[in-house]
Image (cartoon, helix red, strand yellow):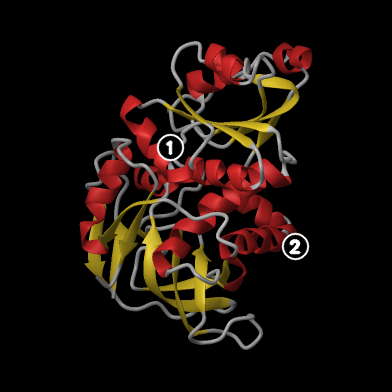
Amino acid sequence: MKALRVNALSDDLSGVELVDMPSPERAPGDVLVRVRAASLNFPDLLMTRGDYQFKPEVPFISGLECAGEVIETDPDSGFAPGDRVMGGNKTGAFAELASLPARGLSRIPAGLDYAQGAAMGAAYSTAYTGLVELSGLQAGQTVLVHGASGGVGLAACDLAKALGAKVIAATGVVDKRDAIDAACSPDSVILAEGRFREQVARLTDGRLCDIVFDPVGGDIFDESTRCVSFGGKLVVVGFTSGRIAEVATNIPLIKGFSIVGLRAGEYARRFPERGAAINAAIAQLAEAGRISPAIDRTLPLSRWREGFEAMARRELVGKVVFEPSA
């Protein structure tokens, strides 16, 4: 089978190679899946460099998540051959076949194709866990979403709008504002640079934001502490800016807000019943047509470098989806 293998860690993708290798044998408790589509996530890029918190031993097959059809499974897995499934593991998705833990898979919601299924899983479970499960999002609240052109950021905007929130989408790239507006129809799109609190204050009549969803970190996090309303939540999703921010504890104390750390995958592993409930809620919204993942481009796996490099250059608005058999 064809698979994208990381042979060595590198800053320029020189350690990554598309190879022909033996098909995997299904591990106990796993489901063998024929991969029809697999989506690129920022941790996939970081893992090629050794910069992600999970550091698999090289060589490893890249790819967090995919969608495809079940080939072989245990009788008690809840799946059967031919089922359309999405999900994944920390590695292994960028291949024609993948042996994946049954607990990490769910059925593709009715009405979604394989590309949409691959693009939905991690992004929307991250958004739902952060906004609803950990922050208690309610209709009518105001949500500020940073990194709004990324897969997770767009999912957060899309989900918050579907649940009745007022959404302020923030980006650091001027040229992406129209594309973000077209992709998820937020109430406002702002350029997050410098003292953007003033923009947020004007858009909210000074009330600021009930929830700030921050995958960027660094200077964005610093300024976001000024954008949270009293009793609000500042959700730490990641650090795509490259700088891990620090905060003086008197700031959340005086302003009365909470800083919430978000690891959606780990949350679902520790609380599998809640993880299943989150997946069910997302599926219900998708089947009702209330949410839909934004896909920037679909590529054959042979053009993997194009997708990775576009992500590294921060060109994307939505997800890159690879098709291993194309």
The C terminus, quarter of image: bottom left
Q: Count the marks: how many?
A: 2
Q: Which residue type carries mark 1?
A: Asp
Q: Quadrant of residue 317?
A: top left
The kind of secondary structure element at disc 2 is helix
94 or 39: nearer the viewer: 39
Q: Quadrant of residue 141?
A: top right
Inspect this view and state whether residue 15 appears: no
Q: Position of residue 216 (x, y in %)?
A: 49, 30
In the depicted structure, whether residue 246 falls above or below residue 49 = above
Q: Which residue type carries mark 2?
A: Glu
Q: Quadrant of residue 312?
A: top left
Say whether residue 308 is left or right of residue 159: left
Q: Which residue matches tag 2?
A: 273
Q: Which mark is residue 268?
A: none
Residue at 67%, 59% in the rendered image? 281
242 or 180: nearer the viewer: 180
Q: Position of residue 62 (x, y in %)?
A: 37, 58
Residue at 42%, 54% in the rendered image? 57
Say whether residue 244 is left or right of residue 66: right
| CA distance separating discs 2 and 1 | 35 Å
Residue at 72%, 38% in the rendered image? 135
The N terminus, quarter of image: bottom left
Q: Position of residue 118 (x, y in %)?
A: 44, 62
The kind of secondary structure element at disc 1 is helix
Residue at 64%, 80% in the rendered image? 78
In the depicted structure, whether residue 183 falls above or below residue 210 = below
Q: Residues within 10 Å of mark 2 (few under 14, many from 20)?
A: few
Q: Which residue matches tag 1?
A: 181
Say whether residue 170 is left or right of residue 279: left
